[in-house]
Image (cartoon, rainbow, N blue to C red):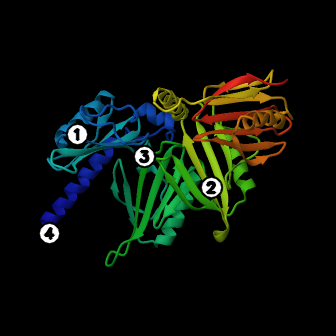
Amino acid sequence: MRCILLLAVVWTTWMVELHDSWAADTVPLKVATVAEAVKALDLMKLPVIKGAAEPVNRTVGQMSYGVASDCKAAFEFHKQGLLKLKWAELPGTSVTDQYASGAFSREGFVCSLTSIPVGEPGMVNVSIVLHGNVDLKKLPIPKDLAPVYLGPQSAMYSTTASVEATTTACHKLLLAQGWVPYGRAGETQFFRLNAIRLTAYISATPPPMSKTMVSFSAEQLSAEIPAPVENVQLQYSDSTKQVLFDTKSSEADIEKFYRETLAKTGWKATTEKPFPIDWKQGLIFRNTAKDLLELEMYPVEDEKVLRVTVKHRTGAEVAAEEKAQLEKLAASKKSPMPPPGKVQIPVPTGAGMIESTPLTLEFTVASGEGKTAAAAIRKALTDVGWKEKVTTADGAIGVIEFQKGESSISLNYVDPGFIPAEIAVRGTGVELEKSAGKK
């Protein structure tokens, strides 16, 4: 019994010392944005061990890869890299032949580093996770919660209150601090604030303890994608930077939510109205950094809900996609196959050019002239054998596809009637050339 009590005292003392050692360095000024997280630790550019393949999993909040090494060497390589970046090693590091792990902090941010054997002998998997700058011990909690473990990566509590009462109380307190519900899975609830997702796991322990356990952890997200609070089955994937949820709200309500919410952080819709994408309705938002948010929504009649997806891409990712298409186009010219043809696209004299590349022509014309300019392009293409498929083509909006062999061209225009009309022509397998159109 004395041995058990002694161990308990030693464990409690060690936990207090650990808590005190990192608490002073993890007091965040505010919950991190994506930009602040990248400034603290840019995992997208962090060097890997020599000889390792480029990680297939690199996000703002996580990097993992396999490499021929041992646990100790792999851990030491990244430990030294973090120390050079002014990250401080926290107490609790464990390094063995079979497992190595540790936590580090810098200016309120916390990251974890692990290396474990995987696959064939001599191979290890290295993982670095950025947990953000949330001081978990300072999260608002019900007064009856007793601390079980308070660490840099998780905080655990227990209570005699019921799971339902504890869940309700925690939910209310987190909302009051600014956290927004961001989906749930069974006994796990997710909340988001800026680019941090907080996980709250609340469950009952079996007899004879019969207590409610509460566990908090946080992760850094790669995108700040809002979602309305009233939703069903919200899911967020950081690898694809996409939010998917169902809602009882109407398309008009969802459009209004995103226009108003995104406008507060500098996003602007590229069209005045949603445009059709097959059976869906879509909107695209851009910001000054040329990042892109793509909103799609469609009704699911059987379930009587509206299904919504929102996907994020950075300006660099959009540019990379464009570059890849251009490189593919250039490569096709060098292949034995016939080179892609050049297609003349009539652009009205006086049009305001937005973008002009071999794959894309975007321009504006006077309000009310969008359909007319599009009609001239349609005629020019069908006259030389392009087959046309019209989704919609009225005075305000047009979505038209053209096909010729393996090549395709899309034509979209938006003309709300009170601002200049916007026209976009994009080609696949062909080069677009601007030709003079009528005034």
**Which mark lies nearer to you, 3 or 1?**
1
**Which mark lies nearer to you, 4 or 2?**
2
Helix, strand or loop for disc 2: strand
Marks 3 and 1 in Cβ contact (< 8 Å): no
Helix, strand or loop for disc 4: loop
Q: Mark 3 vs mark 1: which is more N-terminal?
A: 1
Dividing the picture into quadrants, the one containing residue 47 is top left
Classify residue 65 as left or right of residue 259. left
Q: Which residue is mark 4?
A: 1
- Which residue type does callout 2 highlight? Val
Q: Mark 3 vs mark 2: which is more N-terminal?
A: 3
Q: Which residue is mark 2?
A: 308
- Picture layout, residue 157 above or below residue 427: below
Q: Residues within 10 Å of mark 1 (few under 14, many from 20)?
A: many
Q: Residue at x 60, y 32 (%)?
A: 430
Q: Mark 4 vs mark 3: which is more N-terminal?
A: 4
Q: Mark 1 vs mark 4: which is more N-terminal?
A: 4
- Which residue type does callout 1 highlight? Phe
Q: CA distance from mark 4 to mark 2?
A: 59 Å
- Picture layout, residue 51 above or below residue 110: above
Marks 3 and 2 in Cβ contact (< 8 Å): no
Residue 377 location, x and y as percent? Answer: 76, 33
- Identify the disc placed on residue 135: 3
Q: Which residue is mark 1?
A: 75
Q: Residue at x 25, y 43 (%)?
A: 91
- Picture layout, residue 153 above or below residue 292: below
Classify residue 287 as left or right of residue 118. right
Q: CA distance from mark 3 to mark 2?
A: 32 Å
Q: CA distance from mark 1 to mark 4?
A: 38 Å
Q: Residues within 10 Å of mark 3 (few under 14, many from 20)?
A: many
Q: Quadrant of the N terminus?
A: bottom left
Residue 109 location, x and y as percent? Answer: 40, 39
